[in-house]
Structures are given as structure tokens and as C-alpha cells.
Image (cartoon, rainbow, N blue to C red):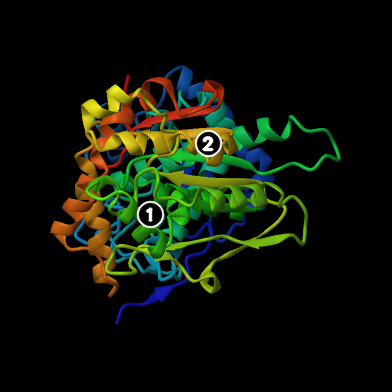
Amino acid sequence: MAAFTALTPCQATTLHYNNIKICRYHIPYQNVCNNNKTIHKTKSSLLSNHHSHRPKPSPAFFSLSTQSKYNMPPTHFSNSGSGSSWLQDHSMHHDASSGFELREGPIYSVFPTKPAQVSSVQDLYEFICSGPLVDKVGLTPERVAESIDKWLFYGSKLCRLFQLNELYLTIPQKARFYHYYIPVFIWCEDQISQHTSKFKDGEEIPPLVIGFSAPQGCGKTTLVFALDYLFRITGRKSATLSIDDFYLTAEGQAKLREENPGNALLELRGNAGSHDLPFSVETLTALSKLTKEGMKMKLPRYDKSAYSGRGDRADPSTWPEVQGPLTVVLYEGWMLGFKPLPTEVVKAVDPQLEIVNKNLEAYYDAWDKFIKAWIVIQIQDPSCVYQWRLQAEIAMREAGKPGMSDEEVKDFVSRYLPAYKAYLPTLYSEGPNGSDPKHLLMIEIDEGRNPILGL
């Protein structure tokens, strides 16, 4: 029987750089930060080597850095259907109340059976700086060097969250943490700082609502899951919402079908018109007022597995509770920020979109006006959505929950494709409805859900 041990926040990693030994054996983050002498030496050396004769990285990190910068090797779709093909186990669990919501599982790690390949802080620094998001999130080599202790801390915590041994991360796993999740987290922190700076001392500061607009299955839920965890371990209260949480009840969906006979785009949940907009306004308004200690509310959740995958709002007794004061609300959805288009434009894509486009006119006031910072995850080909959605349904079936069959998934996704074809070009060229370019991060990903350099 395999032996297991609890993975401590900074377990079993010793990094060497220019004869400076940074030992992270059971060292809490505060102690790492207070070790100013070692950290400052490391920062100075990092910058010196970056701007002059940098040492040759170890072979593993050399190939990792060059490949990830110019041609990130795609990860393969996993059979688990977890929606996170870069993970090689079932680290994430499915919450029964929400259909496909992620929650943290037990923390453990298998004792390694082979020697660890330990890399230097310099190797990690060079790898971070090679990431495709560095410039987009406003990072410089100097900023990375100054905050290298935080990168080490965040990386170790993400390993803990996803039940990965930080000594044995694969290339896709390292890239997912250091080229994607952590840079985005740092960008979110900057956005929060800008948001709070607008208020005077003593004023109540509403949480910053960050919108994540991304097609189904591209990894936005896992990204939000990781960001929420990083906010919590750094002492800030956050709440997570999905536009799925505001779908009409099963009864409301049935009524919508009856009112739109023959319109396949409104037969099932998904497109504009299938959401309870007054309920979403009520929820987002209440969250914006969660600014004091002792204030609390429950967040709605949707059960996608109900009625053989047609879905229904989850029982309120299963809704999670959040408490104030909230710092940030992470709000994600496949059609966040979509702008209504001229009728002739949408009818040219699919005549059934005409009523959907009309419904979309009410969504700015219900959703988008609450969002003050945006992250848009771009895809190159909407056809990827089918494969990604299929993985999610397979995961639900493997978890013992009723889900759609493969043919039902194909039919289900086909009802979203017209909207993707109609609205994604404008979203990518102009940004979300009402967004400010200063508070907008565009991230292009490949079929493996990895960020790429883009244009």
C-alpha cells in the first residue's frame, strides 16, 4: 500500500543559486519574506545575470523555457474529462450541488521513488520571464526578481491545491502555474489595488467584480478556482459566481421553450433569454454591499446534472455562504460581454439568433455594468468547444452523476455555435460590452488550453 503524507506549504524543496541556499523545508511564507538578506542577494544576482551573462539553465528548464515561449507543446485531452488535461490525476472534485464546480480535495502526496531534479532560482526566474503573459500583465524582469519569493510561495501553494509534488512537475504543469495562473493572479492584484485607491480612508470599499469571458470548457472554471484559492491564502475574502448560477429554473426553461417553438437555440439553457436577469441583479447588488465584518449571504448554484443534464437551480440549502468584507468577486461565463449586433448581421449567421440578439439587449444592465475589470480568454477555433464539453460530461458520468451522452453533447454544443460565430469577433476586436481597455486582459489559448503569444 502506498504511503501518503501531508504536503506542507513549502515542503522538501531546496533551491541553489550562486552558492546561495534557499531551503524551503517547512518554512512558512512569513519567514521566507523576513529572510531579507538571502532574498535581496538573490534578487540582485537575478537582475545582474538577466542583463549580462546569464548562466546556462539546466537542460530540463532550458528546453522548457524555449519550447514554452515559442511553441508550447500542447497537452493532450485526458480520459478523465476533468477539464484540466495538464493534470495527471483526479485532483479536483465535482461538487454535488453545482454539477461541475471544483472544490479542493484532501491534501496529500505520494513519497517519491526517484531522485528529484532540483533547479535553481535562476532557472525558475528565466522560465517565468519567458512566459507569454509577462508583458501583457505589466511584468518586467525587475518586478519578477523583486517578487521572486512570492512566486515561490504561490507555486508551492498551487501544488498543494492540485495535489502535485512540486519536485516532479511536468512541463505543462509548470507552464500552467508560472505562465498562466500566477501572472493572472498578479494582474488581478494590481486591478484590486487600482480599485481600492479610488476610495478615501474610512469609506466602504465594494468588492471589485472581475469578469471572465471564455468559451465553454476552455479552463475558465479551473482558473477561477485557482485564483479564489490564492486570494484566500493571502488573507482576502473572495466570492465566485458563474452565469450558469442564474439560469432559469427547470420550470422557467420549459416555459421558454413553449414561448419559442421551433427555435433550437432556446430549447435548452445557454443563450440569451435563458437566464433569470432580475435574480442576477439582486445577487450582484447584494454582493457589492458585502463590505463589513459580520455581513454574509448565500451564493446561488446551478445543478447541471438535474433532469438528465438539462439542469435546474440547486436547492438553496446547498448554496455556499460568503462573508464580508469581500475584496473581489470572480464572475465567469461563456457569453459575458457579448454585444447586441445589427439584426441583419445575426440573421446572416442563423435566423434563429434574431430573438436571442433582442434578448441580449437587457444583459448589459443585468451583468456587464457590475464588472469593472475583464479577462477575456480567446480561442482560435470554436469547434474546440465540443471536445472540451464532452470531457466535462464524461467526468460527471464517471463521478456517478447523470450527464449527457456523446450525441446529446454534440446537439447541445451546436446550439451555442451560432452565438460564438456571431459575437466572438466583436468581443475580440472591441472588448466586452462597456469595458475599459486599461482594465482588460486578453489571453489567447491553444487547443491544450495553454496561453500563447498571439498577436
Q: Is residue 354 above or below residue 206?
A: above
Q: Nearer the viewer, residue 258 or 331?
A: 258
In which quadrant is the N terminus drawn?
bottom left
Question: Residue 131, located in which quarter of the rendered image?
Answer: top left
Q: Give the total number of marks visible in the rendering.
A: 2
Residue drawn at 28 percent across, 75 percent down: 400
Which of the two discs, 1 and 2, labels the residue nearer the N terminus? Answer: 1
Q: Nearer the viewer, residue 54 or 425?
A: 425
Q: Secondary structure at mark 1?
A: helix
The image position of residue 238, as x and y in percent, is 60, 52
- Which residue is painted at 29% across and 33% down in the image? 68
Which of these two is toward me, 10 or 228?
228
Extreme residue in the right direction: 202
**Tag 2's secondary structure?**
helix
Question: Residue at coordinates 25% horizontally, 52% vertically from top-left?
Answer: 389
The image shows residue 395, relative to residue 197, as above or below, that is below
Mark toward the viewer: 1 or 2? 2
Q: Determine which residue is flagged by label 1.
A: 167
**Residue 218 picture location, percent across and down:** 32, 44
- The residue at the far left in this view is 407
Type of the residue with mark 1: Leu
Q: Residues within 10 Å of mark 2 (few under 14, many from 20)?
A: many
Q: Which residue is mark 2?
A: 368
Q: Is residue 19 visible?
A: no
Left or right of 86? Residue 180 is right
Question: What's the amino acid at mark 2?
Answer: Asp
Q: Which mark is residue 109?
A: none
**Residue 445: x, y in percent?**
31, 35
For the residue pair 326 and 23, the one nearer the viewer reads as 326
Q: Quadrant of the C terminus?
A: top left
Instruction: Name the residue located 25 percent from the left edge and 59 percent from the top edge.
Output: 81
